[in-house]
Amino acid sequence: MKKQTWKEMKLQYPDEWLLITDLEQDQYGNTEAGVVIRHSNNEDEIYKEPLPDKPTAMFYTGESTFSGLRSHVEIADPV
């Protein structure tokens, strides 16, 4: 498996969950590159097989539907 940049992963696996090893991160902890060892539209599929015996990370390449703190900002009264 070949190491790819995050941009390449997003292009090759749009709107999919990725299980990545051999991560390279910038000084802020953002993923810059890694090796995709699994991918799926379904998050649960990533965990059906045993995880490898090395550090891994899971990411989604699509847009987040999590509103989180943004919803609080949107409803806050302006001062």
Image (cartoon, rainbow, N blue to C red):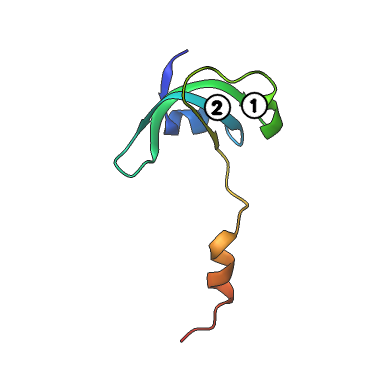
For this view, does 39 lie left or right of residue 21?
right
Q: What percent of the width, then of the height, locates residue 42?
A: 70, 32
The secondary element bearing badge 1 is classed as: helix
Q: Name the foreground residue: 78 vs 50.
A: 50
Q: What percent of the width, then of the height, locates residue 60?
A: 57, 38
Residue at image point 42% right, 23% down: 4
Q: Which numbered tag is attached to residue 56?
A: none
- Amino acid carrying label 2: it is Leu
Residue at image point 70% right, 31% down: 44
Q: Mark 2 — residue?
A: 19
Q: What percent of the width, then of the height, locates residue 10?
A: 51, 33
Q: Name the foreground residue: 51 vs 28.
A: 51
Q: Mark 1 — residue?
A: 46
Residue at image point 41% right, 19% down: 3
Q: What percent of the width, then of the height, locates residue 73?
A: 53, 71
Q: Relative to residue 63, is residue 18 depicted above or below?
A: above
Q: In the current view of this chain or complex, which residue is farthest to the left?
A: 27
Q: Name the foreground residue: 78 vs 53.
A: 53
